[in-house]
Amino acid sequence: MTPTRRDFLKASAVTAATVGAEAALARGAAGEGERVMQSGVRTVRTPVLEIGYEEHGPPGGFPIILLHGFPYDIRSWDGVPEPLAAAGYRVLVPYLRGYGPTRFLDPDAPRMAEQAAIAQDVVDFADALGIERCALAGFDWGNRAACITSIFHPERVRAQVAIGGYSVQDTVTPGRPGRALGEARLWYQWYFNTERGRVGLETNRHDIIRYLWDTWSPGFEYTDEAYDRSAPSFDNPDFVDVVIHSYRHRHVNAPGEDRFVEVERRLAERPPITVPAIVLRGLDSGFGRPSTGPSGDQRRFTNLVARRLVEGAGHDLPAHRPDTVSDALLELLA
C-alpha cells in the first residue's frame, strides 16, 4: 500500500523525537573537528565549509550518505534512515552549502554553488569523517552531486540510488531553447538569472519555495507544519547567493571557481556512471511523467541494476515514498 502524506508526517514526528537521543549516543564517536550541537545536529569542518548533518544507526556501520536538493532540506529524508539503521548501516544526512546550519568558513569567499563544487563538498564531507567508501542517494542537486562523485571517484562509491536519473549538466555550452512546456516548467531558472529574480528570492523566498513544492509535486498537500520544519534551512544567510549562482552558472551566465574549470569541461562530455546503481523516477512529478523506456538510463548508467517508476511520488520522492529509497539501498548493499 502506498504511504500517504499523512503517514509520512506521522513517521517524521517519530523520527524527530529520536534525533536527540541518537545524537547523545553518538557524542562518544565524535572525532577531531566534529561537534554535536544541542539540537541533535552534528557539524564537521571541511576545507571550505562547516557542514551540519544528522546521523542515524551504529557508528561502525557501513556509511550511506543521503543528499537533498533545491528547494528542500534534510527533512525530505526523514522516512528513509530507520530501516537502514535497523539493518546496521550508518546513515549520514548533510545540509548542502547554503542550507540550514552549514556555513562557509571564509566570510569573504564568494558564495558559489556550481555542480562541481557541490560534488566536491560530498568528497570533503566523507574525508572529514574518515569515510573511505560509502553508498550515495540523492535527488535534484543532491543527485547531481552523487552522480559527479560516482563519475570521478568510483572507487569510493559502492552503490548509488539516482532519484531522477542522470543529472549532470553541460555548463560550458549554452543550451538551446526548448519546447514551450519545458521552458515554462523552468521559469524559476530564468527568473533567477535576472536581478529581479535575485531580489524576489531574497524578499519572497518562502512564498516561492512553497509554490515550487506545490507545483513540482501536484498530487501532494504540504501542510504548514511540514513546511515549517524545513523553513529555517532557507533562512541560511548564504541561501540566496548560493541558489542564484547555481542557476546562473548552469546557464553560462556566471563564472565558476577556477579550481573546477577542467572538471566542468569533463562533465560537459556527460561521462557515464559505472558504479552499481538503481534509478528511481516519480510518476507524479510536476516536471512531467518519465519515459517508460529504459534506454536513456541504461546508456548513462553502465552498471544499472534496476530502473523503477514510482507510484505516489512527486519531485520530492524521498518524502513521498521513502520505502522505495531504503529498499533500493538495501538491495544494492546486500
Image (tube, grey):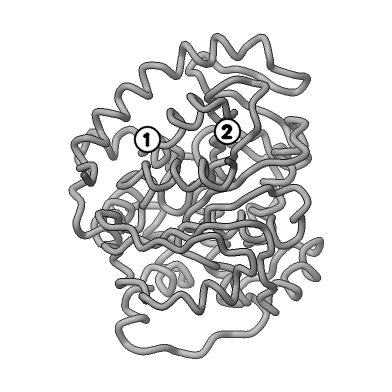
Amino acid on which the number 1 mark rests in the picture: Gly
Residue 196 vs residue 41: left or right? Answer: left
Q: Quarter-wise, where is residue 14 in the image?
A: top left
- Distance Cα–Cα, label 2 vs label 1: 13 Å
The numbered disc on residue 114 is none
**In the rendered view, would you say 54 is above or below 305?**
above
Q: Give x and y (percent) for residue 78.
A: 39, 34
Q: Residue at position x 62%, y 77% from top? A: 170
Which residue in the rendered view is the most extreme toward the front? 334
Image quadrant occupied by the C terminus: top right
Q: Residue at position x 67%, y 58% from top? A: 275
Q: Give x and y (percent) for residue 212.
A: 31, 58
Residue 165 vs residue 34: left or right? Answer: left
Q: Quarter-wise, where is residue 94 in the image?
A: top right
Image quadrant occupied by the N terminus: top left
**In the rendered view, would you say 284 is above or below 128?**
below
The numbered disc on residue 79 is 1
Residue 173 vs residue 18: left or right? Answer: right
**Residue at the disc numbered 2:** 92
* Residue in front for this viewpoint, 275 or 232: 275
Amino acid on which the number 2 mark rests in the picture: Leu
For the residue carrying disc 1, how many other residues have a C-alpha within 10 Å: few (<14), some (14-19), or many (20+)?
many
Q: Residue at position x 54%, y 39% from top? A: 95
Q: Are marks 2 and 1 in contact (CB under 8 Å)?
A: no
Q: Quarter-wise, where is residue 309 in the image?
A: bottom left
Circle 2 — which element? strand
Q: Give x and y (percent) for residue 15.
A: 37, 24
* Residue in front for this viewpoint, 80 or 262: 80
Circle 1 — which element? loop
* Residue in front for this viewpoint, 109 or 172: 172
* Residue in front for this viewpoint, 242 or 152: 152
**In the rendered view, would you say 181 is above or below 59?**
below
